[in-house]
Image (cartoon, rainbow, N blue to C red):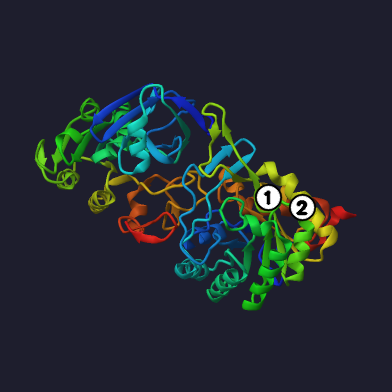
Amino acid sequence: MAMLETEFAGLRLRNPTMLASGFLDETGGSMLRAYRAGAGAVVTKSVGPEPRAGNLNPTIVELDVGLLNAVGLPNPGIMEYEHEVRHAREGGAAVIGSVYGKDAEEFAAVASRMASYGVLAVELNLSCPHAKGLGTEVAQDPEAVEEITRAVKRSVRVPVFSKLSPNVANIASFAEAARRGGADAVTAINTVKSMAISADLKMPILKNTYGGLSGPAIKPVGLRCVYEIRESVDLPILGVGGIETGRDAIEYLLAGASAVQIGTAIVRRGIDVFSQVCREMAAWMDENGYAKVADLVGVAHG
Amino acid sequence: MGSRLTQVVPLEEVVIEDPKTRTYRFRADMRPLPGQFLMLWIPRADEVPMAYSYLEDPMGVTVREYGDATRALAATSRKGYRVGVRGPYGNAFAIEGRRALAVAGGVGIASVIAAIEAYAHAGIAIETAFGARTKSELTFLDRAKACGPVHVATDDGSMGHLGYVTDLAANLVASGTFDMVLTCGPEVMMKKVVEAANAAGILVQASLERYMKCGIGICDACVLDDRLVCTDGPIFWGEELAKSQDFGRWRRDISGRRVKA
């Protein structure tokens, strides 16, 4: 019987699936629900220094191939977020805190506060493509990624994961920048910058014009990014982008990820997607003679 | 169900129900059930969740002006004006029981009128307790009357009982006549109705409203304890609401902060 319990960047996980940041994770109740539904860990909504309303609607466009969103980082702010994390933790959830800020100093301050709430690790949202002034510029500058990662590493004791944007020419150079900054892992990928236009109305559908694409459409992009990072950077990788089935998750492991995150698949498969993916992964591993997750990581590189 | 991709549709009819309330009718590739909702895109303004007040083509939503987007819609829309719709979303009212009571407050009637008609259509006796501020705001009174007896309350006494619909509902629920209650309206009203029905041991289903961004179960804006109004609701059973810490007390604001309901 394949064992799904695994280690990722120093964390013991009951399985290698996590709730991806931005999905059902603004509130403690919802995070706990995802954990109880089988996620190995849950990543919080990205939280910043101040409460933030996000963008006006429409913020979502449902597509046949995935989901386009420009929710715009709404969050209650780090000072009010403590009870959400505590609520999830007191129910037994393994919680990773996602944070953002406008510069290294702000990232470090928010991450430090988040760590004090008892999260197992912090994930740095360095790459939100639809929040003006936050993320997009950072995502285009490896030096900023390095500087922010270093500042956060100095301010927290828990592992730090730098979440990278696919909207760059060479994602491996950003992973390398995160490594130089002291990151314990990288998360790849954030959403792919996109848009939707209504032919009937001859205008963009999203109020924000641009959004981030997620879901099955971006799985090949995510796989390519994870594969490229694995080729040149020696860091654990959290693979994310279009994972809906156990087979999708296995593909990410083969590309080089050591654990995976799931978000958009909740829309199609419901919150039970975590236990379903785990069952499907275990079945595949049994059929193919793999006893543990670590044995699969990077196998596609030959 | 039909496609959940955004459909741009022309308004076939705009009905002025009262100075602040309009019904917008349109044809779309959707098969909604009573109590379900759609996301209504008002181009250049906003996108908002709205219950279907008519289920069949031309289907409709009934909107009371309460903010910039709904005011913009009322000001600019006329026959032929194009809006975006996606849905149907959420669960539906269960159409069951032997004798049902619908309790509606104000424009809450829009969420429950299709269910009232579904009860009548299913041959289940249905009565309605309907409250509004004043007589002119009793939208769909005729549709409700066509399904069964209607008990009216108005805040100003311009029709029916002078006072709140919860006064009428309390007596009706206690009368022992009904084995099912459905309700939609202001949350304080629904809380009283749910408590009365629970106390009387009668099944009750309430249609809740929350701020939403996505409507499809990801943004977490419409959370009620650990349930989502968009995908677990909008209809919740009284038994679940009795255990809720949030129902009638807390909601989330646009940035996710817990604020008084």
Residue B225, position in %: x, y?
41, 58
Lower sequence index among marks 1 and 2: 2
Q: Residue A196 carries which label?
A: none
Answer whether labels 1 and 2 touch (C-beta < 8 Å): yes
**Dot 2: few (<14), some (14–19), or many (≥20) neighbours within 10 Å?**
many
Kindly identify the residue that appears in the image at 36 percent across and 28 percent down.
Answer: B77
Tell me, for residue A225, which label it has, or none: 2
Q: Name the residue under label 1.
A: A241
Mark in the foreground, 1 or 2: 2
> Along the line of sight, which residue is nearer the eye, A19 or A202?
A202
Amino acid type shown at disc 2? Cys
Percent from the top left, x then y, of residue B84? 47, 32
Image-quadrant location for residue A124 = bottom right
Say which quarter of the image contains residue B50. Answer: top left
Q: Pick out the residue farthest to the right.
A: A302
Separation (CA) of disc 1 from disc 2: 10 Å
User: In the figure, residue B118 lies in which quadrant?
Assistant: top left
What is the chain identity of the residue bearing mark 1?
A
The chain letter for the residue carrying disc 2 is: A
Q: Please state if A46 lies on the left or on the right of B120 as rendered.
A: right
Instruction: Judge whether residue A127 can be spotted in this image.
Output: no
Q: Quadrant of the C terminus of chain A?
A: bottom right
Where residue B246 sits in the image (x, y, percent)?
36, 58
Which residue is pictured at 49% across the width and 45% down the height? B214
Helix, strand or loop under label 1: loop
Discs 1 and 2 carry the same chain letter: yes
Q: Which residue is drawn at 73% across and 62% down?
A: A142
Placement of A157 over or under B256, stated as above or below: below
Amino acid tagged 1: Gly
Residue A112 is situated, as x and y percent measured from the top left of the image, at: 57, 75
> Relative to residue A179, is residue A282 depicted above or below?
above
Q: What element carries label 2?
A: helix
